[in-house]
Image (cartoon, grey):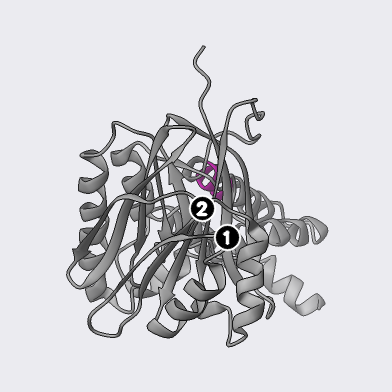
């Protein structure tokens, strides 16, 4: 241990380590469009806490140069991550007005236990449910099991592999519209709360597997944004599996261009949040939580929304 401490106390070694720490933070914030850097970007929260732990260790071993560098990079990443999420740390108080609860699930992470998965979906008691990566078997099982609680539904599949999106609602689905980016389906629809319309868009963006996929991801986000920009009269909720963390450039630009708020207040330590529920300024998010499947895998998210009070 003393030998390692001596090595770390050499000024040139400390400068190299400090430069690597700074580069790690810089690449998390200004991420080049290369697969390795994009993959590392998704672990920005873990890297931030790693810098915090490193700073404490350097403090214990009296290495102020490395300590200050680690703490400064930790603070920089914390501010960046907070800026990339919802700026309000506390959820607004619920009013006496109506609320709508919305959930998004991905059945690919739920395992093969159909009944346990269905029970979890029902237990959320959400008013509108979006189910991602649904196939014809899941579609049949879900429609049969949820018909009592969710009598209104719509499903659309991708022609290539028959994976798609299913929508299940307690209230009638109005103006259901399917649009595609290439062969990837997206569902737009409307429902009502006490005779007030709320528009929805459920989307699935395929994960990037290599650098060639970046242009397709950006183009898909642009397609979604063009739909949202043309439909901003009513309150709008956009949900789905975007396969991008909330601090990625794609998501930040998408939210900015479409004037959307993030339901998630701050990313968690363990999970890489790639499923999202966004909403327009006519609404307020008064609650949000992540849901785990029976196999302990991340299964979905649920948000609660109310109409923004008019002052």
Lateral position of residue 158 relative to residue 148, left or right: left
What span is colored magenta in the figure?
Answer: 77-82
Residue that carries the numbered disc 2 in the rendered image: 170
Q: Nearer the viewer, residue 214 or 304?
A: 304
- How crowded pointer 2 is (Cα within 10 Å; few <14, some 14-19, many 20+) is rated as some
* Tag of residue 149: 1
Q: Is residue 239 above or below residue 91?
A: below
Q: Nearer the viewer, residue 74 or 99?
A: 99
Q: Residue furthest left?
A: 182
Question: For the point 33% across and 54% down, which residue is it?
Answer: 250
Question: Measured from the top left, where is residue 163 in percent x and y?
Answer: 35, 79
Task: Provide residue 168's location: percent of width, then percent of height.
Answer: 46, 61
Residue 66 is left or right of residue 2, and the answer is: left
Residue 50 appears in the rendering: no
| Image point (25%, 39%), residue name | 231
The reply to whether the C-beta atoms of the residues labelled 1 and 2 are less than 8 Å apart is yes
């Amino acid at each position: 241990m003393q030998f390692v401490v001596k090595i770390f106390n050499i000024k040139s070694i400390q400068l190299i380590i400090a430069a690597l720490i700074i580069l790690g933070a810089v690449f998390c914030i200004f991420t080049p469009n290369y697969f390795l850097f994009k993959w590392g970007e998704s672990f920005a929260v873990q890297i931030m806490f790693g810098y915090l732990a490193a700073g404490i260790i350097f403090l214990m071993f009296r290495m102020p140069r490395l300590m200050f560098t680690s703490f400064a990079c930790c603070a920089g990443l914390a501010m960046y991550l907070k800026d990339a999420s919802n700026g309000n740390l506390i959820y607004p108080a619920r009013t006496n007005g109506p609320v709508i609860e919305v959930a998004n699930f991905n059945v690919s992470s739920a395992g093969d236990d159909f009944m346990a998965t269905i029970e979890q979906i029902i237990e959320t008691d959400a008013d509108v449910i979006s189910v991602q990566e649904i196939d014809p078997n899941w579609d049949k099982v879900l429609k049969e099991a949820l018909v009592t609680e969710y009598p209104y539904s719509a499903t659309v599949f991708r022609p290539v592999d028959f994976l798609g999106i299913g929508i299940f609602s307690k209230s009638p689905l109005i103006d259901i519209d399917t649009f595609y980016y290439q062969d990837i389906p997206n569902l737009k629809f409307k429902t009502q709360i006490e005779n007030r319309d709320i528009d929805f868009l459920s989307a699935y963006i395929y994960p990037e597997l290599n650098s060639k996929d970046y242009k397709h991801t950006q183009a898909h986000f642009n397609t979604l944004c063009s739909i949202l920009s043309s439909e901003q009269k009513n309150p709008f909720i956009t949900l789905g599996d975007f396969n991008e963390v909330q601090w990625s450039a794609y998501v930040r630009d998408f939210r900015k261009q479409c004037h959307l708020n993030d339901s998630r207040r701050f990313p968690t330590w363990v999970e890489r949040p790639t499923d999202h529920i966004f909403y327009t300024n006519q609404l307020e998010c008064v609650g949000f939580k992540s849901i785990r499947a029976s196999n302990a895998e991340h299964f979905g998210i649920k948000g609660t929304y109310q109409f923004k009070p008019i002052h």
